[in-house]
């Protein structure tokens, strides 16, 4: 590998500096603690394992990262300097390089001291030279410049410290103690969202009244349509949806020893289901491909005992890892040994008042290496293994089997721009005889957003989320261009939640998101009106996580009947403000402190820089009304969610 003239000059400078100090290279620090939007930071190579390259120059030493990304480094006050070159790595595909942009920045003891300006793929490396004498901390940041690309490759090359004391140490962001903002739930019956439910005519019906409060509780309903039955002890409505399209108003009452409450729920029978964003649980972010029958049953039991159904969490979804061989009466994919009786499992989940989902793919092989929905032979045998589409589609076979088992949700992975497979599956699900929600994954192109809205209920807009600040915020804050495609029955999906305990099959552990960051996560997904699919181990929910997931006023923003995605109103380097009109005429306002220091905001639309919004502010996390002159102290990486009415 060649050195450039620029690199030679830098190394000469290092030789001079090291005469009176000790050199510590950035790439020798613990890169596992780098927080970035995707992938992992790499020593002496780009994050895609290619040589470090900026414009026409290549470099032997440095760190390859992803923008957005942050490196936090503890110093002992005896570091002298930090010197490096920065730039956009040029190893990305040409179509990405044409749009790539990165801005680098450095912060000493919380104060910004240097910024590169926006850099493009053809820009030569720019130097950063920092005086660190007396400094206790250094933060090195790379921003994706909000250009619609979350995968810009950002390089810190020839990056080194000159020190007299201990080596600098890469650290994770300090983690605050968990704190619960959500008030304790009332023992009296309280109706929660959703207040509207969609079903297709004549289909099997399952809906649990979303009512929290002390059990036992007794439920009644007036004018229940023929064909539907309400279980008075559980509040679960089952049967067959009416054949005649239209709105049916279910006047329901819940009573317990603490009191009584009534509400009217709209049953809308027509051509759309999922009239509010789907809520529930998915297995992937905690169990990966290790999911099994026994785990699903434990999850159903836990969601039942914790009362999560009472807050609208209705789906329990099996992700990749359930598949065995093709066979059975439909020549469909049969479950493997981890799922001895799929029909019995579906019936068990339904008996708890939950719906259940399954996973498949139009390819020969899924991402976890299991059989997909197509094959190269007429019988469906797998020849070799590949994540490509086979010559023969077995979607009709598989849909018939899923409907026979009684599934209610399909996650179909990997679709990208394949509208042919999407339409085939969409038509089959609608003709299956069941209301099966259709969710496609992964990273559907925005150019086809209108197609996804016509063919599916939810579509993934991004790559897979990870439990890091930059992954979560990059995915969430880049949703704004997708806003026109969302409405009742069709939703932009920025992926599953990563609060609580997660693991991806590698052992259950606490999420890497701090408590402040988890409040941001739920606030952002709520203002987006995104699907709220828990990805955590609900069998071990602590009080903090349960409070995050069961704040009825926060969830009401997500489940608003207008089903709109929030609008990005204000965006700068330090904060974001999003707004969302709600069906009752009020407006939700989410404030995000994305900077490194706490900030103060006023609970007043004009002071926030917003126009056309008025009314009394309410803090939805704390469920308390505020005076317009109230101030909000929002911690770094924290959020507030207000309602103006």
Image (cartoon, rainbow, N blue to C red):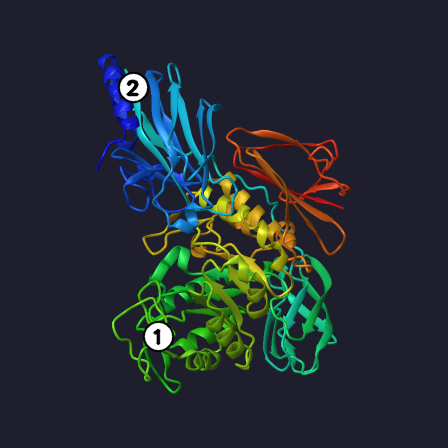
Residue 390 has which mark?
Answer: 1
From the top left corner, tell me how far across and down residue 354 is, in percent.
53, 68
* Whether residue 467 is visible: no
In contact (CB < 8 Å): disc 2 and disc 1: no
**Foreground pick, 516 / 250:** 516
**Foreground pick, 382 / 604:** 382
Disc nearest the viewer among 2 and 1: 1
Residue 506 has which mark?
Answer: none
Q: Quadrant of residue 21?
A: top left
Instruction: Tell me: residue 49, above or below residue 141.
Output: below
Q: Residue at horizontal 55%, vertical 81%?
A: 431
In the image, taking residue 630 as reference, residue 293 lies left or right, namely left
From the top left corner, tell me how far across and down residue 100 is, in percent.
45, 43
Q: How many marks?
A: 2
Badge 2 local density, few (<14 within 10 Å), some, or many (20+)? many
Badge 1 local density, few (<14 within 10 Å), some, or many (20+)? many
From the top left corner, tell me how far across and down residue 50 is, in percent.
28, 45
């Amino acid at each position: 590998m060649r050195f450039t003239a620029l690199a030679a000059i830098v190394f000469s400078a290092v030789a001079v500096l090291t005469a009176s100090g000790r050199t510590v290279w950035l790439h020798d620090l613990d890169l596992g603690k780098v927080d970035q939007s995707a992938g992992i930071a790499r020593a002496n190579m780009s994050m895609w394992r290619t040589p470090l390259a900026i414009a026409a120059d290549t470099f032997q030493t440095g760190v390859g990262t992803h923008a957005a990304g942050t490196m936090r480094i503890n110093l002992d006050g005896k570091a002298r300097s930090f010197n490096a070159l920065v730039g956009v790595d040029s190893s990305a595909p040409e179509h990405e390089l044409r749009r790539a942009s990165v801005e680098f920045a450095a912060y000493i003891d919380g104060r910004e001291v240097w910024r590169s300006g926006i850099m493009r793929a053809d820009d030569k490396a720019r130097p950063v030279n920092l005086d660190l004498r007396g400094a206790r901390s250094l933060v090195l940041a790379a921003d994706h410049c909000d250009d619609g690309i979350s995968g810009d490759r950002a390089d810190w090359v020839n990056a080194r410290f000159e020190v007299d004391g201990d080596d600098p140490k890469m650290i994770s962001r300090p983690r605050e103690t968990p704190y619960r903002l959500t008030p304790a739930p009332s023992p009296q019956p309280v109706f929660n969202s959703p207040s509207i439910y969609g079903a297709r005519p004549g289909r099997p019906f399952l809906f649990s009244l979303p009512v929290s409060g002390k059990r036992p509780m007794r439920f009644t309903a007036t004018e229940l349509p023929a064909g539907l039955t309400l279980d008075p002890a559980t509040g679960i409505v089952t049967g067959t949806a009416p054949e005649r399209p239209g709105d049916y108003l279910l006047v329901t009452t819940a009573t317990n020893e603490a009191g009584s409450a009534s509400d009217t729920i709209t049953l809308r029978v027509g051509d759309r289901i999922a009239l509010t964003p789907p809520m529930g649980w998915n297995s992937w972010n905690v169990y990966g491909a290790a999911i099994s029958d026994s785990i699903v049953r434990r999850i159903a039991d836990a969601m039942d005992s914790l009362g999560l159904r009472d807050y609208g969490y209705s789906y329990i979804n099996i992700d990749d890892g359930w598949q065995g061989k093709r066979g059975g009466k439909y020549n469909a994919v049969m479950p493997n040994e981890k799922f001895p009786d799929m029909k019995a499992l579906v019936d068990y989940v339904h008996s708890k008042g939950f719906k259940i989902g399954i996973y498949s793919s139009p390819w020969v092989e899924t991402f976890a290496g299991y059989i997909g929905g197509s094959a190269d032979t007429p019988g469906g045998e797998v020849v070799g293994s590949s994540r490509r589409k086979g010559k023969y589609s077995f979607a009709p076979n598989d849909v018939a089997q899923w409907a026979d088992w009684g599934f209610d949700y399909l996650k179909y992975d990997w679709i990208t721009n394949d509208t042919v497979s999407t339409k085939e599956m969409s038509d089959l699900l609608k003709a299956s005889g069941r209301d099966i929600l259709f969710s496609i994954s992964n990273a559907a192109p925005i150019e086809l957003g209108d197609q996804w809205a016509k063919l599916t209920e939810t579509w993934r807009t991004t790559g897979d989320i990870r439990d890091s600040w930059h992954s979560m915020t990059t995915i969430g804050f880049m949703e704004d261009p997708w806003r026109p495609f969302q409405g009742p029955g069709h939703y932009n999906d920025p992926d599953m939640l990563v609060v609580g305990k997660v693991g991806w099959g590698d052992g259950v552990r606490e999420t890497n998101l701090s408590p402040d960051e988890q409040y941001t996560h739920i606030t952002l997904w709520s203002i987006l009106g995104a699907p709220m699919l828990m990805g955590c181990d609900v069998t071990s929910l602590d009080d903090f996580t349960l409070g995050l997931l069961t704040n009825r006023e926060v969830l009401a923003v997500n489940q608003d009947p207008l089903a709109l995605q929030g609008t990005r109103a204000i965006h700068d380097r330090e904060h974001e403000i999003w707004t969302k009109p709600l069906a009752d005429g009020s407006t939700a306002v989410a404030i995000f402190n994305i900077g490194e220091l706490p900030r103060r905001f006023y609970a007043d639309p004009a002071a926030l820089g917003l126009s056309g919004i008025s009314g009394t502010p309410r803090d939805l996390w704390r469920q308390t009304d505020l005076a317009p002159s109230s101030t909000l102290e929002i911690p770094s990486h924290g959020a507030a969610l207000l309602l103006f009415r």
